[in-house]
Amino acid sequence: MLYRKLGSSDLEVSVLGFGCWPVGNEWTEANDKSSIETIREAIDLGINFFDVAPVYGFGHAEKVLGKAIKGKRDQIYIASKCGLRWDDSKNITRNLSRESILEEIDLTLGRLGVEYLDLYQLHWPDPNTPLEETITTLNELKEKGKIRNIGLSNYNVFLINEAKKYGEIVSNQVLYNMIDRNSDHYHDLPLNYRTEAEILPYAAENNLGVIPYSPLCQGLLTDSFEIEKLDNGDVRAANPELRGEKLQRNLKKAAEVRKIAKELGKSTVQLVLNWTAAKKGISTIIAGPTNVEEIRENVRAFDWELDSEIVKKIDAVLEP
């Protein structure tokens, strides 16, 4: 496994991270036993960065991750998030107020069964709370030893610079994959940043760690994507890249990427993850395996180097 510094932090993170959205049983058939086995296998394979959020399964993913890492806390880094709160009807709102954060951190630590987080990320910008209030609160959590580093998620360059006025920001988690290189939406949520055009160059120049999420475009960039599963009951059906004319164009791109992977004797997942990791500014990639076989396949993405000529071939395929 390869390891890289996460921005300006002292964390040496595995280039392949473990995303816990599927652990919350949001859009997969993952069960808790399988999730725990997969997480433990990931640790054994050298993965040390685990990304979760309270809203994944409405607390469930944090609880499962907590069970899986018992006795292994000193081997890993845990990243969670704050800012998305839900009510009894599971309606989600953005709230990065001081009061909300102080409540959220204790709930998260309790579900995980740990005393601190290595990285605490603002899940989405909250237009109703001043960044000064939010970052000042996180600085207090650092002083108390509840968190080690502050990160952002889905923040544009302007807001990153604003946040840096009040505290050290080590990372930004953003949507990025071969299809979503500069997408303006994630599902039905507007994105006020463009990853490849803005975030990656800024990160490389300012020692900010970039953490791409959805590197496989929610399964499209795999060898096992089944379009018939994208019915109204699948949350992925809300992804604009997986609907209408965009879906048809992206299916063609994915098919070409699969051909290139086959020529190289690699799986599509291995090619996609390797290509993503080669982008300047990226620290660790958040992929969400649902079983032991998938995590083993993912890890093999980094035991070989991608030739520059192959990169050019891929880029030609991905042109709009």
Image: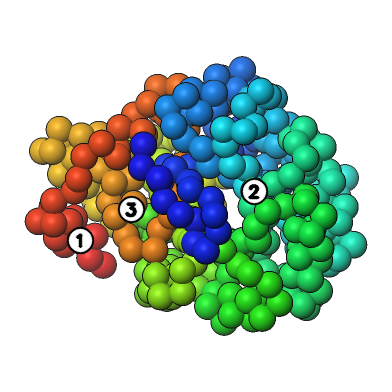
Residue 289's spot in the image, x, y percent? 47, 33
Residue type beneath disc 1: Asp
The kind of secondary structure element at disc 3 is: helix
Q: CA distance from mark 2 to mark 1?
A: 35 Å
Instruction: Find disc 1 in the rendering and name its residue.
Output: 315
Q: Earlier in the sequence, mark 2 or mark 3?
A: 2
The answer, for residue 140, to whether it is visible in the render is yes
- Point out which mark residue 276 bears: 3
Residue 168's spot in the image, x, y percent? 63, 69
Instruction: Find disc 2 in the rendering and name its residue.
Output: 118
Quarter occupied by the N terminus: top left
Comparing 126 with 151, the one in front is 151
Residue visible at 24% across and 60% down? 318
**Side of 108 relative to 279 (left or right):** right
Which one is closest to the eye, mark 3 or mark 1?
3
The kind of secondary structure element at disc 2 is: loop
Q: CA distance from mark 2 to mark 3?
A: 24 Å
Q: Earlier in the sequence, mark 2 or mark 1?
A: 2
Crowding near the residue tagged with mark 2, few <14, some 14–19, many ≥20 C-alpha atoms within 10 Å:
many
Which one is closest to the eye, mark 2 or mark 3?
2
